[in-house]
Structure formats: C-alpha cells, structure tokens
C-alpha cells in the first residue's frame, strides 16, 4: 500500500516522507533543560520535585519501572495501526470504545471531534482509548487486538506511576490537613483508574512546516499526563519563562506534565504547563499519552477556585470551543476579584 493512503485525504497533498540522512533535525546533540525526576527517589528529592512542579509543570521521569521492551512494542504497534489505510482506520477504529480522529484533539466524551474552524486545524491523527473499557473491546483486526493487549499491561504501570506521583504531591502540598477535600484514603479518586485514557498520536512529516502545528498551544485538562514519546523524532515544545523549549527525545524515559486539575487542586502553586507540537520536515512522529482525571463525584476545591467537578470543567471547555473556537479553561472557575 502507498503510505499516503494511510493519511486522511486532506493531508495527502502535503505529506513528505523521503528522509535525507544529511538533513536530520532528530535526536541532535542539543542540551535538554527539562528537570529529571527519579521515581524511586521521589520523596528523598523533595526540593527538586517541588521546583519541577512549580516552575515547569513538567519533568522527565526515570526509573519508572516500565519495561523498555513494552515501551518500544507500543511504539511499533502504533506505527502498524496508523499505517493501515485511512478508510480501514475510519471504519474499524471507530468501534466503541476506540475512536479514530484527525485534524483536532478536541473531542466530546463519546469521541466525536468538536467542530472547529480552519485556523484550528492540527496536523495530527490519533486513536482515543478509554482504558477502563478495553476488556469489553473485541476487535476484528489482529493489529488492534495486539495493541489492546499491550495497553492493558501498560495501564497497570501507568496507574501505579500516577498514584505514586499524586500521593507525593498531596503530601508536599499538605492537602490532607489544609484547605482541601481529601484524606489519604480518598486520594485515588482524584487520579481515578477508571478515568484513565490513552491517546496515540501520529504527526505526519511535512516539507512545508509553515502549514501549521502538529498540535496548537494548549494545556491538558487532566490531573497528570504521562507521555511515551518517539525516542528519535523531536516535536514537543514547552513554554518556560516566555520561551519555547524543545523536549529532547531520550529513550526509556517518560515525560510527565501537570494538567489543569492539578493546578486548581494546588491553588495555583503547581503549574499546568503550556505546550505544543511542531511538525517535523522529514519524519513522522508517534507519541502515546496517558491522561488521568478525577472520578465523577470528586470535587475540586481550593481558595482560588469555586468548587467544581471535572465533568463541569469538561462541559465548559466544550461550550467554549464550540462558541469561541478555543479553550478558556481554569479562568472560568476562578473566584471573582
């Protein structure tokens, strides 16, 4: 099959896949300023971890305990799925619970893409996978079944990592004893395993990078997002001190970023980081991101914000995207001055 057939029709005229090894903007020897956090030393390195949460809202996680073979298998299986023809993906990857999307990462709870204008078009296609429903999914294609089994294994690791990180955050912020709503036994409802979802993204290569962004500037609505990114092709950029910095692809590491829910829970002490994805001229890029959210009844409550649930936040975001073309986010829930 011609590889162009794997892309949505609107992208086919612009995709470029003839890699020139002499023109290589991937895995260059540039410095990586992103703070590195060791999961096994999370509590011992409290100050480093706090600085990353407050100043960056993002860090690189090492010693995470996920086998490197699993991370690589997921990347390879994702490439295989995305290499199927657009028509096949559209027909078979839109079966509940997995949803195929392209052109925008803004989806309704059922996985339908929200209507957005041409200026919001993103150079991306993806699969939306609610992990709690994977056991019910019976795919007809062997490629989808293979990735389903891998994701079920992957989810156990991600849930462990998210819970470990969140518990340390809660302790550092003294949320058990201060202004917040939770006790130690309740903390898991704010990184609820049942809400966990994975999005697999493919960002096509494009010789004309002025065509737009792989993903436009945004913050995540999650509590935490955990990214298994391509270990060769760069693209993710984060905003730090009014400068955009490229996050270097490094094998066997994960990128963890804090989302809007965590910023609100921390009463703005921690940062929901702004980030974007640029288009690569020579190579497509695969990334696999895990998002975790508060459970349905969990109330977000801190002095700077009116009490709200994640469902209320999501509904407001969808209203704003439909009406305004963009996400307003946390300012909608701040107390009036």
Image (cartoon, grey):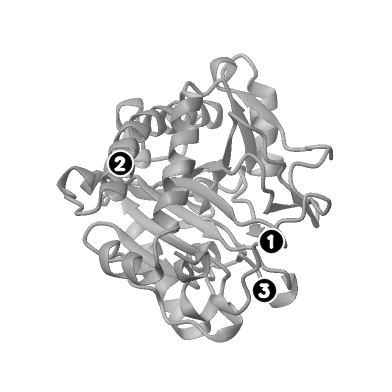
Q: Position of residue 41 (x, y in %)?
A: 59, 15
Tell which circle, 2 or 1, labels the residue nearer the N-terminal end: 1
Residue at the image point whose x is 16% and y is 50% from the top: 138
Q: Secondary structure at mark 2?
A: helix
- In the image, what residue occupies the spot 26% across and 45% down? 145
Q: Position of residue 34 (x, y in %)?
A: 73, 37
Viewer-side residue, 303 vs 24:
24
Quarter of the picture holding the N terminus: bottom left
Identify the secondary structure beneath mark 3. loop
Give x and y (percent) for residue 121: 56, 77
Residue 243, by quadrant, is: bottom right
Q: Is residue 48 above or below residue 189?
A: above
Q: Is residue 296 left or right of residue 29?
A: left
Specify which label sits upstream in the sequence, 3 or 2: 2
- 10 Å crowding of disc 1: few (<14), some (14-19), many (20+): few
Q: How many numbered discs sit on the rendered protein?
A: 3
Q: Nearer the viewer, residue 263 or 176?
A: 263
């Amino acid at each position: 099959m011609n590889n162009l057939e794997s892309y949505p029709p609107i992208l086919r005229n612009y995709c470029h896949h003839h890699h020139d090894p002499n023109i290589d903007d991937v895995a260059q020897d540039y410095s990586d300023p992103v703070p590195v956090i060791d999961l096994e030393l999370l509590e011992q390195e409290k100050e480093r971890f706090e600085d990353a949460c407050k100043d960056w809202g993002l860090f690189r996680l090492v010693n995470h305990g996920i086998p490197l073979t699993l991370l690589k298998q997921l990347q390879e299986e994702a490439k295989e799925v995305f290499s199927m023809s657009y028509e096949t993906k559209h027909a078979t990857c839109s079966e509940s619970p997995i949803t195929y999307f392209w052109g925008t990462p803004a989806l309704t709870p059922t996985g339908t893409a929200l209507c957005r204008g041409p200026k919001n078009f993103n150079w991306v296609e993806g699969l939306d996978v609610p992990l709690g429903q994977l056991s019910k999914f019976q795919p007809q294609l062997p490629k989808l079944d293979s990735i389903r089994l891998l994701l079920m294994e992957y989810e156990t690791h991600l849930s462990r990592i998210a819970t470990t990180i969140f518990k340390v955050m809660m302790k550092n912020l003294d949320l058990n004893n201060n202004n917040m709503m939770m006790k130690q036994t309740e903390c898991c409802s704010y990184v609820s395993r049942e809400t966990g979802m994975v999005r697999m993204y493919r960002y096509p290569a494009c010789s004309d990078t002025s065509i737009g962004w792989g993903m436009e500037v945004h913050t995540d609505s999650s509590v935490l997002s955990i990214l298994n990114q391509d270990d060769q092709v760069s693209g993710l950029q984060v905003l730090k001190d009014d400068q955009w910095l490229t996050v270097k692809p490094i094998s066997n590491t994960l990128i963890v970023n804090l989302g809007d829910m965590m910023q609100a829970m921390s009463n703005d002490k921690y940062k929901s980081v702004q980030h974007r994805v640029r288009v690569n001229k020579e190579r497509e890029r695969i990334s696999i991101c895990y998002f975790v959210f508060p459970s349905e009844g969990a109330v977000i409550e801190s002095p700077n914000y009116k009490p709200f649930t994640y469902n209320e936040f999501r509904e407001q975001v969808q209203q704003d995207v439909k009406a305004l073309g963009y996400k307003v986010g946390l300012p909608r829930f701040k107390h009036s001055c």
